[in-house]
Amino acid sequence: MDYRGNLSEKQIKKIKKFGWGFGIAIAVLIVLLTVVLSTFHWITDYIWMDSLGFEKVYTTILSSRILLGLAGFVLFAVLTYFTLSWILRVYVHHFGPQSLPGYFPSKKLGVLIKTVISILVGVVGSEIVKGVGWEPTLKVLKHASFGKTDPYFHMDVSFYMFILPFMKFVLFVLLGLAIFFLLIEIAAYAMFHIYRMNRSAQVHMGLTLGIVGILLAALHILGPYGTMLTDQVNIFQKSVVHGLSYTDKLINNPASYVLAAVAILGTIWMIMAMVRGKLESMAVPIVVYLGVVILAQGASVIVQSFVVSPNEFSKEKPFLEHNLNYTKAAYSLDDITVKENPGNDSLDEDMIKRNQLTIDNVRLNDSRPLHDIYNQLQTFRTYYEFNDMDIDRYRIDGDYQQVFVGARELSTDDLPAQAKTWVNRTLRYTHGYGVAMSHVNKVTSQGQPEYMIKNLPPEGVLDIKRPQIYFGEEDYPNVIVNSKVKEFDYPSGDDNKSNEYQARTGIPLKGINRFLFAIKEGSVRMITSEQLTKKSQFMETRNIVDRVKRIAPFFDYDDDPYLFVRKDGTLSWMIDAYLKADSYPYAEPHQGNQNYVRNAVKVTIDAYTGEVKFYVVEPKDPLLQTYMKIFPELFTKDIPADVRDHFRYPEDLFKIQAKMYGTYHMSNLEVFYNREDFWQFPTEKYFNEDITMEPYYITMKLPENDKEEFILMQPYTPKKRQNMISWIGVRNDREHYGEMFVYRFPKQKNIYGPQQIENRINQDSVISQQLNLWAQGGSDVIRGNLLAIPMEDTVLYVEPVYIESSNETSLPEVKQVIMAYGDHIVMESTFEKSLDKILAMIDPDHKTGKKEEDKENEKTKGGEKEEKAPSQDAQTQLHNIAELFDDYQKAASEGDWEKAGKIMADIQNELEKIK
């Protein structure tokens, strides 16, 4: 039914006019809403960055994104409007204004439709260009030179790191846009076979086709540079060389130039064929192009299979040398000091005395069980939590001591349900409190860590002046400080202490700020609450990793931030920032395409104020120099001594370098080609599972030095073998920070590796029996990290053994220490006893430190002391062990671990007699 018959022509015009007006109003409203929302986020982000002093960093990124977005919008929108206008004009000229198909819009409507489509395409283009292009653009404009050229094209490395990615980005954007327009033109001109009859349509398609050809040719011209960054020689095969190879030089690079020429000539052919109306012949250049591609790939396969593979080493030898040298440079492996270690059996009492500080800092506690202990014994309330345990070192009372430290953070998710109100979560429970610290090498008689700092408020060897933790690793909600509500500080008996925030580093909630951030938070209470004052401050993005990513999103950040105590008693977090790239020529990737990595920046975040500092650690790194040119206000060059004292070489970077060095330490090209001397990370038994050994920090004295220092180290074993072939380390202290070195053991001599020690522990009848007895007594036996402790020209192994009851509230406790040296393995209740016993085995004249009464077999039963007579035969011995084991089970089930430990010592003595 046609309702228009009931309406006058005037009414229909009014309805149409209203419809157009309404549509335009909706469109304008959407645009305005988008602009307002974008502007709103820009303003609030700027205010936050300004509160931290990084407003210029933000404006640099924002302005570059806006300019690129505008450029992308104009490029995409104008070209889209131009294309649609040309298509429409072709239709008008081809059919005539009066003969256009009925579905074609009027002139005014056509302009509107073209404008709307152009704007939409422009918005998409803007997002693509500004989202992907802002960083490559800034890098290419401000890039620093590496001062090192590739061996084939003689281009500076900066060309591959900065210029080539930018050129590819531009070409791919333009090529994608040109292909998009070409498809639109083909679809438009295919209707009614316009492309056969209309010269303007042919010119339009020819012009677009020509642009596609030129851009495709340009990509082919850049192709040879790409061979410096890959080992893929064709779609089927890879080369032994990562970078330019024999097949690349002989086949692939010339083929790229041939394809570029074919693309240009083929484009000209297609344009001429289209203009002349010989449309069938337009397929000829496409077939030729595909034929050249197939021919090039086939030639590459033939050369790689029949020329290179049978004589691979001789053909690839010069390229292998480039791969070796440039990979070392990309991972900072070209300046490693290599030294020989004879691996002598030279341990004696004098060596122990010379390396006493090393011995005093051997780690007996492991972070995983220690984390559980801290969370049970040092949280005091359900809403406190230690996120993880970190290892560091301090000079305390003149002694260099390695320690475990953990931050007592606040987890509002663990508040009681009735306490999870807006006031509590936003105004009252705002921060964690204090740290706990313990020796790495000392445990109590119950096997618990010996604390250096503990309790609330913190008490111990360091004077912590500002223990409140407003910023940390927890998923902290945004909070408001300096309100009328007293902030909870820490529990004290039945009372709670309160605190008032003293710094001025938050966002002041006065004027328009309160309104803006209330909208951002979606919180009406921020506007209506009477608890807020003019002094109130809004604390946003309090998770430290999220905080630094928001400030500098162009860095990669380590997953393990760590807390340290500064000289003035304040608490700060340290995060390692990495600079990574995937375009260093001839360098082997360590993951995906990434083949360049540096830890050129250390970031500190004050746990109280949230103040962030980006400290420059490697000022000579060209990638960092580029960022310093782009964001000069971001970086701090002067590093305070109390910050530098807590620099730790990051484990993640060290693992990457150590793994690459396992292959790239080989300097002989033939050995390198065959991977004859490949080194790998050893395995160890940890928590009753065989795992790959992780790098670990150790305080030790290098053979050529006269004092101990903080070292990160990793042992190596040969491929498919378990003996230790070498170990790699990196120094952490002051002016020696980052210096890497390797000690190699003689290849003709067996130095026990970690897994060999683990296997020997399992095969030791006395130790394995004792571990099995504990495991059968309602307890879990946890094997801690096995540590290889280098001392001068020898190596000592230490492994703690934890005992944990099966119930949920049990605590893992260090009950035994296994020590291995050479062919000797012992297990005693303390580190000192194990070392004493090892020395006694090495030197029969060594006087043990055991007291006579420790050798007596005593046990407590029914409150009376009974003396065990020495066993006369095997039956008596087994009977004694059975009784002792029953007593042990009883004591363990009652949770009397002190008594159980004494009984286990008696069992050990009985087993020693059997042995």
Image: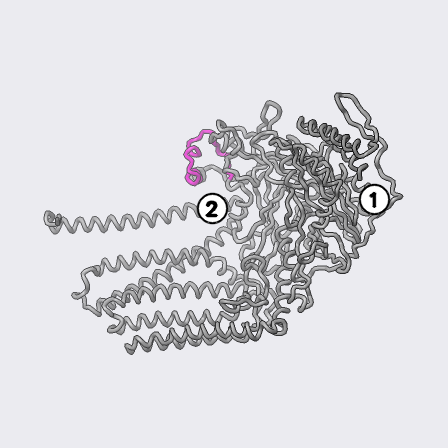
Disc 2 from disc 1: Cα separation: 64 Å
Q: Which residue is mark 1?
A: 839
On screen, residue 489 above or below 301: above
CB-based contact (under 8 Å), mark 2 and mark 1: no
Badge 2 element: helix
Which quadrant of the structure image shows residue 564? top right
| Amino acid bearing label 1 | Leu
Q: Nearer the viewer, residue 281 or 583?
A: 281
Which quadrant of the structure image shows residue 306? bottom right
The x and y percentages for residue 479 are: 50, 36
Residue at point 53%, 41% (across, down): 542
The x and y percentages for residue 822 are: 79, 50
Q: Is residue 528 one of those drawn in magenta? A: yes
Q: Dot 1: few (<14), some (14–19), or many (≥20) neighbours within 10 Å?
A: many
Report whether 815 appears left or right of 542. Answer: right
Which quadrant of the structure image shows residue 664? bottom right
Q: Which residue is mark 2?
A: 45
Badge 1 element: helix
In the rendered structure, find residue 494 and report the number of the disc placed on it: none
Please identify the quadrant where the C terminus is shown. Answer: top right
Q: Dot 2: few (<14), some (14–19), or many (≥20) neighbours within 10 Å?
A: some
Q: Nearer the viewer, residue 604 or 719?
A: 719
Q: Is residue 605 one of those drawn in magenta? A: no
Asked whether residue 256 is in view, the answer is no
The x and y percentages for residue 534 are: 48, 34
The x and y percentages for residue 455 are: 65, 31
Residue at point 87%, 40% (across, down): 847
